[in-house]
Image (cartoon, helix red, strand yellow):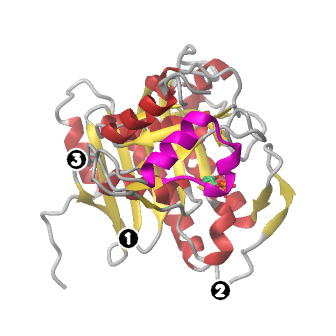
Amino acid sequence: MNVNRRVLTLDEFTIQQLRDFPNATGELSNLLRDIGLAAKRVNVEVNKAGLVDILGDAGNMNVQGEDVKKLDVFANNQFMGVLRHGISCAGIGSEELDDIAVFDDEISNQSKYVCLFDPLDGSGNIDVNVSIGTIFGVYRRVSEKGRPCTKADFLQAGIKQVAAGYIIYGSSTMMVYATRRGVNGFTLDPSIGEFTLSHPNIKCPLSGNIYSVNHGNFFQFGDGVKKYIDQCQKKNKSNGGPYSQRYIGSMVSDVHRNLIKGGIFMYPATTDKQNGKLRLQYECNPFAFLIEVAGGKATDGKLRILDIVPETLHQRSAFFGGSQHMMEELEDCMKNSN
Ligand code: AHG
């Protein structure tokens, strides 16, 4: 078998990045490696979800009052486990946990980072073989090192993220992450069991051809959003024709596609869900960070997502994110509208 040594693995890439920062401790590289390891374990289970009795509800609800699928529980335990046993993470917040999990031991208390994640986003799609994903955001802790981390570490504005990313379990499995230096995508090579750099320096096209929104909620949206959707369906500035509507209902898959091809993803507030559905800390902030580093924009309709200071761990937010020009068209429509 020919092994292509020109292709960097995730570990090789993060170590190479470290060379540019002689004072770096390597903790972030360790943390990303830990996340990659948990992702590989989750990937194995996701791939055999149709074969074994791991599908379906775990029989309880998460803190958001939604059914928890067994794979959500498995994924949560994997990510929590590797981060707890690693040396770079002082604690985690997870969409599946009521409260933060503080890793109160000698090594973890010395760690620089905390991590917030949605272990298995789009899990409503597990039973029908649609791509699902894991989303994560990494923050430098604000609490004193040497002590257990605190809630304040997890309630920082998204702009404070030092890294954010996602894993998409799809036709191939990919890990995409951003630091301030850029967005890079790694595809899992099953022959060697490693994530390998397949999408270096991802840039979100300035414009695209796709808008993604749950149209079923149309009559519950505000006038500005309705006006924009109406415009998407007509001749528009960017491409002279209607945009294509694509909505999987799995944010990782929808945003991944739009990031690569150009497009806009929207989960607006509705009359039923006046603060939107998506969670600021687990879904909106990591994607806002990725999209901005890739050259796009992300807002809640009024404010830049990354500037919002969360008040609670499981706070929800409306979300609009994607190609810069499409976001500007949306902003025009939302100006002076409710
Ligand atoms: P869940 O993890 O509960 O399946 O939620 C998925 C999220 C997000 O990934 C997706 O874009 C959105 O919820 C879909 O919600 P709607 O079904 O309301 O459109």
- Considering only vertical position in the picture, is 61 above or below 150? below
Q: Residues within 10 Å of mark 2 (few under 14, many from 20)?
A: few
* Circle on res. 131: none
Percent of width and height locating residue 121: 61, 55
Percent of width and height locating residue 61: 84, 53
Please tell me in which quadrant of the rendered image residue 73 appears.
Answer: bottom right
| Residue position for label 1 | 193
SS for callout 1: loop
What amino acid is found at the position of numbered circle 3 in the picture?
A: Asn
Displayed-image quarter of ligand 1: bottom right
Q: Residues within 10 Å of mark 3 (few under 14, many from 20)?
A: some
Percent of width and height locating residue 312: 71, 25
Count every numbered label the image shows and give the total: 3
Q: Nearer the viewer, residue 179 or 240?
A: 240
Which circle, 2 or 3, is nearer the viewer? 3
Q: Residues within 10 Å of mark 1 (few under 14, many from 20)?
A: few
| Residue position for label 2 | 51
